[in-house]
Amino acid sequence: MSREVHVRFSESLRGRFPRATRRVCHCRSQAQAEELRKQLKKRMNEVGLELHPEKTKIVYCKDGKRSEDFPCISFDFLGYTFRPRKSKNRHGEYFINFTPAISNKAAKAIRQTSRSWHWSRRTDKDLEDLARMFNPVIQGWINYYGRFYKSALFPALQCLNRRLVIWAMRKYKRLRRHPRRAARWLSRIARREPNLFAHWRVLYASAE
């Protein structure tokens, strides 16, 4: 690596790269970032690898202090989307911060996974049974994607309640063809027992 590029790159004679490796390198200026990309491309070519032409890009970390215009101001990494977002400091004042939150792709994956659980077919189960079955996975989502900007995770968690409403309408005759009634029934239980489902602890605690 060029000594002009302020980055350390670990190498070994027998070291191997995975088939697809993603790295985030933070630079102080656009010129430094462009030089880094140039040197990375050169080094990858030397070892028979190449940078992905679309995923290898320079992103401007725009926030309240960095307000210049740039074509690309967001990127996805490890299930998070990093982009400018409105945040609140400890004094209650709002400002623009470049921060991560769950990506649209990851939220879509949560919805697809919850759909694959086929809630409506489990009418032989009670709410407690469903909670025991799915809480470990739901809690894992909350632990990972809720670490930063947790409110962005709420829409994906709310889809779990919609699945529960469909389950309730299939299980109880009095709720069939009455989605609003089923939703109110579920909401009463959630407020009475917020610890039953892992996502209830998050959604209903934020509503208080």
Image (cartoon, grey):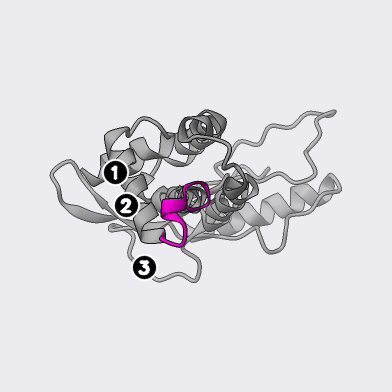
Do residues under tags 1 and 2 come within 8 Å of each other at their CB atoms?
yes
Residue occupied by mark 3:
68
Judged by depth in the image, the label closer to the viewer, 2 or 3, is 2
The residue where tag 2 is placed is 184
Decide which of 202, 73 is in the foreground and name it.
202
Write down the quadrant of residue 208 in the picture.
top left
Decide: is 110 above or below 15: below
- Amino acid type assigned to the residue bearing label 2 in the image: Arg
> Disc 1 marks which residue?
188
Label 1's element? helix
Q: Where are the magenta residues, as a range?
A: 169-178
- Spatial distance from mark 2 to mark 3, Cα to Cα? 48 Å
Mark 2 or 3, nearer chain start:
3
Q: Magenta includes 101?
A: no
Answer with left or right where residue 103 lies relative to residue 53: left
- Counting from the top left corner in percent of width and height, residue 97 is at 32, 53
Q: Are marks 1 and 3 in contact (CB under 8 Å)?
A: no
